[in-house]
Amino acid sequence: MIRISAVPIFEDNYIWVLQQGRYAIAVDPGDALPLIHYLKENQLELAGVLITHHHHDHVDGLPVLWSHYQMPVFGPAGIKNVSKPVQDGETLHLLGTDFKVMAVPGHTLDHLAYLGVDALFCGDTLFAGGCGRLFEGSAAQMYASLQRFAALPDHTLVCCAHEYTLANLKFALAVEPDNLALQERIQSDTALLEQALPTLPSSIGKEKASNPYLRCNQVDVIHAAQQQNPQAETAVDVFAALRKWKDNFR
């Protein structure tokens, strides 16, 4: 049985740690020291690292980790310290389990996600209640990436890289104020944070019920997007209008 844990770093990042016996895999170690402390505390050997994209808060811990563990680093080609470049459609066999590599451009052009143990490690593409900003990719690319996630089974865990949930849900409520699933989620996730507990992982089913970026075909979401851009007709147009609105939402 693989155990999945979230190690907090910086202000709102998480490193995801998957452990099987005395071995562990880490996802997006932007800071090495909290991860090293966690591994030592739990008597774990780091057997590998998965990288979703090149932003510093996801990769800056790699040099220090390498000096301690000399582990393989899987990720997009061209990223410094990635020793095993991977691409869409590949399967990695780690901790006795298969992980599918998914190319999901939008936040960045090189962004990857990893699917295994009924969990999706999606970096900054899909967030709880939201999605990443479009720093490099287009709205069409990001929408297509999110649709790949939406097609996964509802029970799939969503292990994203940031604790942005309440801010995202505040925006989601502005889009769909009458969404009862969203209202209930705000209450439950607020309660978790008040207990100093993470709101993650989420699930694909939960996101499809309350995340506006996965609901671009819903009448209320379309209507809200058209208040921002009356020409928003297609699902991609609706997504683009929502993402632009969120970029300036306070």
Image (cartoon, rainbow, N blue to C red):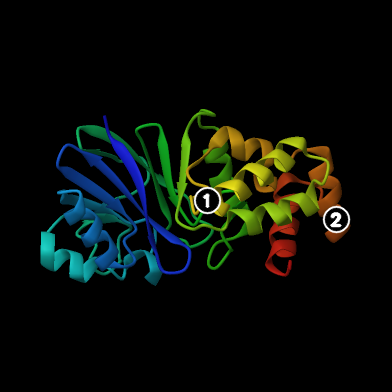
What type is the residue that disc 1 sits on? Gln
Under circle 2, the secondary element is: loop
Q: Is residue 133 above or below residue 205?
A: below
Using the rendered view, name the quadrant where residue 245 is placed: bottom right
Horizontal and vertical percent for residue 158?
Answer: 48, 42
Between disc 1 and disc 2, the foreground one is 1
Please report contact status of discs 1 and 2: CB closer than 8 Å, yes or no.
Answer: no
Q: Which residue is mark 2?
A: 231
Using the rendered view, name the quadrant where residue 147 is placed: top right
Q: Which mark is residue 102?
A: none
Q: Camera-side residue: 17 or 40?
A: 40
Q: Which quarter of the rendered picture does the C terminus lie within? A: bottom right
Q: Which residue is mark 1?
A: 195
Q: Which quarter of the rendered picture does the N terminus lie within? A: top left
Q: Residue at x 74, y 52 (%)?
A: 237
Q: Residue at x 85, y 53 (%)?
A: 226
Horizontal and vertical percent for residue 16?
Answer: 35, 50
Mark 1–mark 2 distance (CA, rounded to whole Å):
43 Å
